[in-house]
Image (tube, coloured by chain):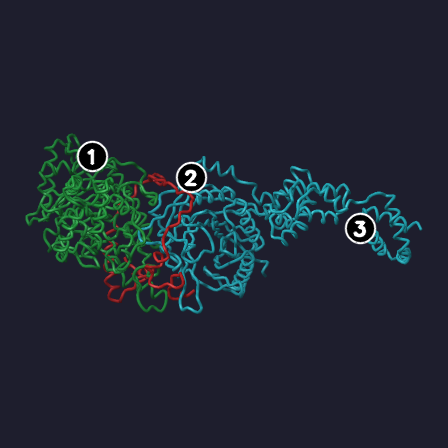
Chain colours: A cyan, B red, C green
Amino acid sequence: MINDYEVVIGLEVHAELNTSSKIYCSCKNSFGQDPNTAVCPVCMGLPGALPVLNESVVDFGAKMGLALNCHINKLSRQDRKNYFYPDLPKAYQISQADIPLCENGWIDVPVCGGVKRVGINRIHIEEDAGKLLHDDIYDGSLIDLNRCGVPLIEIVTEPDMRSSAEAKAFLDTIKMTLQYLGISDCKMQEGSIRCDVNVSVRRRGDTAYGTRCEMKNVNSFSGAVRSIEYEARRQIELIASGGTVEQETRRWNDAKGESIVMRTKENAQDYRYFPEPDLLCIKIDENRLNDIRESLPELPAEKILRYRQNYGFSDEESLLIAENMEWADLLDKCVIELGSDPKSICSRILSDIAKYQNATGKTINETGLTPERLSGLIKLIREGVISNTAGSRVLEVILEKGGEPEEITKQLGLVQNSDIDSLEKLVSQVISENEKSAADYRSGKKNALGYIVGQCMKRSGGCANPRIVRQLVEKHLECI
Amino acid sequence: MNIDVSHIARLAHLSFTGEELIIMKEDMTRLVEMVAELPENDIQPGENSVDAMELRKDEVIPSGLSKEEILGNAPETEHGFFVVPKTVE
Amino acid sequence: MKLYQKNAYELCRMLREKKVSSEEICRDVIERINSHESRINSYISVSNDIIAQARAVDKALAEGKAASPLTGIPIAVKDNISTKGMKTTCASKMLEGYIPPYDATVISKLRAAGAVITGKTNMDEFAMGSSTEKSYFGRTCNPHEPLCSAGGSSGGSAAAVACGEATAALGSDTGGSVRQPASFCGVVGLKPTYGSISRYGLIAFASSLEQVGVIGRCTADTAMLYSHVCGSDRRDATSVRRSYPDFLSCISCDIKGVRIGVPEEYFGECVSSDVRKAAESAIDCYRKMGAQIKTISLPLVKYAVNTYYIISSAEASSNLARYDGVRYGYRARNCRSLDEMYFRTRSEGFGSEVKRRIMLGTFVLSAGYYEDYYKKALYSREMIRREMINAFNECDVMITPTYPTAAFRLGEKDSLSMYSGDVFTVSANISGLPAMSVPCGYTEERLPIGMQLMGRPFSELLLFNMGYAFEKFTAGSFMGGALI
């Protein structure tokens, strides 16, 4: 029954921009200050105070718009969104209604081995509200205005997504894009990126959209997935049992895994939008747009697709590397400038290097690793100078202290022994000390081979070329 | 024209007694009738004269307000926060 | 002649020639305040440090510090302009105890110029009104006739200047609130070009319509005060980046060849005969001075009041939404829930006129009505603005009566009937044009009458020249009536 229906998803993502100052005043844009200390008459909404727009907010908004292939409106306008809430000092939020900064874009999201194009309806700039805290001991609500006036961009998609997986992939890609552009730090736990989810369902094959419900209080990307799945199921079950979906705003409760009605269509808010009279039009000229366009780096969606296509990485590998700009940078330098094999670099990054960084908390920059050193190490392994396992030990030293792979290999005595004569001697020696295992092998227990090879490796201190050792052991065992 | 003054009052977060509401409805009706007379628009869209504004440099300038100045006018504060009766979510 | 009767430029000369100190001037003004306040009620709060301010100025002058024409001069400020550390109430219970932690830009400029701020003047609550009868702190009476209104909403500022309780004053003008009280009180009142004076710190009523206004006893004083407070301000995005001349040194009474437009729609039936006679007589003076007079037509003026009330109420409903008892101002007592706090605070804190305008503003912005009212009014506004600007192809300045009548009696008019009286003044606010009221006559009962001069954007110098020329031509016979 569920498969008779298609779920249609649209998302509204709010991201705090990491400008130095707030959007309409020169207060510091930061998190975690003592309450009501990063405020001024403007962001407090004192009588007589006036907003003045921060140029970086416009630049960052346009940058995101260009990254998402939007049309940037050279002239756009701010509007007031009027409602009462204690965390909103002016009782209106300055936002953009009719003429937003960016419109009609799209982004190709890598998902499920393919690509999904999600349309971007608009991106606009607006101010954040303060924080309301509920005190259990104290019989009241506490208000901190530090966050008032922190700049936000709101990204509104077209209802193009058809599964929670697509929605999650979209959110991951947007988050990465914001980080790549350097315009938002995207710390979900600090609230610097939030999303509202719009869900409707329709019978497969229908072209008209069903009634949609909006869900608020979705506090994580995985929460978005859960809320979408819950809401789709709720709506389908409702329709299947003969009911109709009402247009509602619902509040998602992740702990309980359910949503409840906040507002119905009847008591929907009337925000009475009108043009902000304290601000004139925002103008952004062609030169400035070109400068911004030129400053765009390769975007994560493009990067992921390139990794999949050119390097043959899986979806997961591509995402993991692309998500981490240092890793992506390291990989690309090793492969493109130094000619290393991409898969080898990738696996080193995702294993040894990731493990080291997790344990020490360092960035690549803070370690002794450089693209040249990593590339050099991979070359040594490829040429058989050093085994894979020994390579990990050398890499650890490089990460901790720096140094060149060849030298460290020699210092640690890890140069792989591929000399047939000395290995022949070693193998005969070990086989002669392990008569029982040799006999086991000849009588059909093929595992004994591995045991003998292991003993040879141990005897050689890990330096014997394991491939050659294995061949020799096989040969000896077969012959005798 | 029947103006839903209760709804407007709710939007504006104003409350009126029954009597006041009747008077307000009369006033509003008169006013709305008066201001309704406006000329027919003969301006083409996009023809509006448009003024663009100068933007502010992204730099931090502390407000210089003391804690007393920030919280001093508030009816109720607690440990640096403004306090209001509990909201109903 | 007593010091409180002297104009600013005379006082400036006397200070420069060390014939008088600022303290002496201020003591005179304080005495005048003490003797007149109980009758006139111009002030909501008189500064408690006037003498200290004056002494500081005198000390600086004695040390040879540079002086401006404003140094040591007692200036009153309308109580909707933020003054740091001094109560700023907007004549409302809602802000009864509010003490701003910052100065409006115009106040910073006054202080930097060494002006002495005498106090905060009475007004209609939140600047909504035309009679200063809608104040939480009582009404202001007209110094010429205490049974009559001083006009509004800057009635306190106009009355203070007219009767010597201040040498000059700042007000605010959203739909005529500086010009009309100026005409009622027999003083000069300027609403400058929109964007020429910073609105930072002016407590907002209708953001796209209002400007700080300047009130003086004569045109020269008005020009002097204007030149000290005008100028672009990076804290106000709507202020215009522009340099201004030193108006005082540029003023001239030569207006030969100036083309004066007289809009016929402004001389209709609603104009009382006294006012019409005075205005026509003034126009005649200009003719004798060599100006060219031409009748013009501004047919869209019949929509001006409607357009004004829709836009100003809409902006007011939004600008006044911040008064919620949370961070400053009045809060209703013993509220058990947030909603109760919001509703009771706003209903108890605002007067009835303010509530009426908020309701109208909320209505015209609300779903289902926005297109037919607010949006239509925006177009109407643009059409009126174009009509005005086009009219200045045929003339350089327009002359009209400031108000259809002279001062009406206190308690005589109800709110709704007062709205239509704004018809002559609102067009300048709608169009952003500069306009100045200059005393030009008296009624039979010796109530002052004002004429309004309107010009192109940033044509204040021409307006000053026109006012100055008229004062000279008529030997100042329409000035100073309430100074005895």
**Which element is circle 3 on?**
loop
Eye-nearest disc, 3 or 2: 3
Q: Which mark is residue A266?
A: none
Residue farthest along the right direction in this orientation: A480
Q: In this view, does A246 lie above or below C176?
A: below
Q: Distance between the residues labelled 3 and 2?
A: 67 Å
**Coordinates of residue A85 in the picture (x, y in percent):** 38, 59
Tag 3: amino acid: Gly
The crowd level at tag 2 (other Cα within 10 Å; few <14, some 14-19, many 20+) is some
Eye-nearest disc, 1 or 3: 3
Residue farthest along the front direction in this orientation: C63
**Coordinates of residue B77 in the picture (x, y in percent):** 37, 63
Marks 1 and 2 share the same chain = no
Question: What residue is rendered at 54% in x and 51% in y?
Answer: A171
**Which element is circle 2 on?**
loop
**Residue A97 visible, this angle:** no
**Residue C389 visible, this angle:** yes
Q: Residue A461 carries which label?
A: 3
**Coordinates of residue C205 in the picture (x, y in percent):** 28, 52
Eye-nearest disc, 1 or 2: 1
Residue beneath label 1, please? Answer: C249
Residue beneath label 2, please? Answer: A284
Marks 1 and 3 share the same chain = no
The chain carrying label 3 is A
The chain carrying label 1 is C
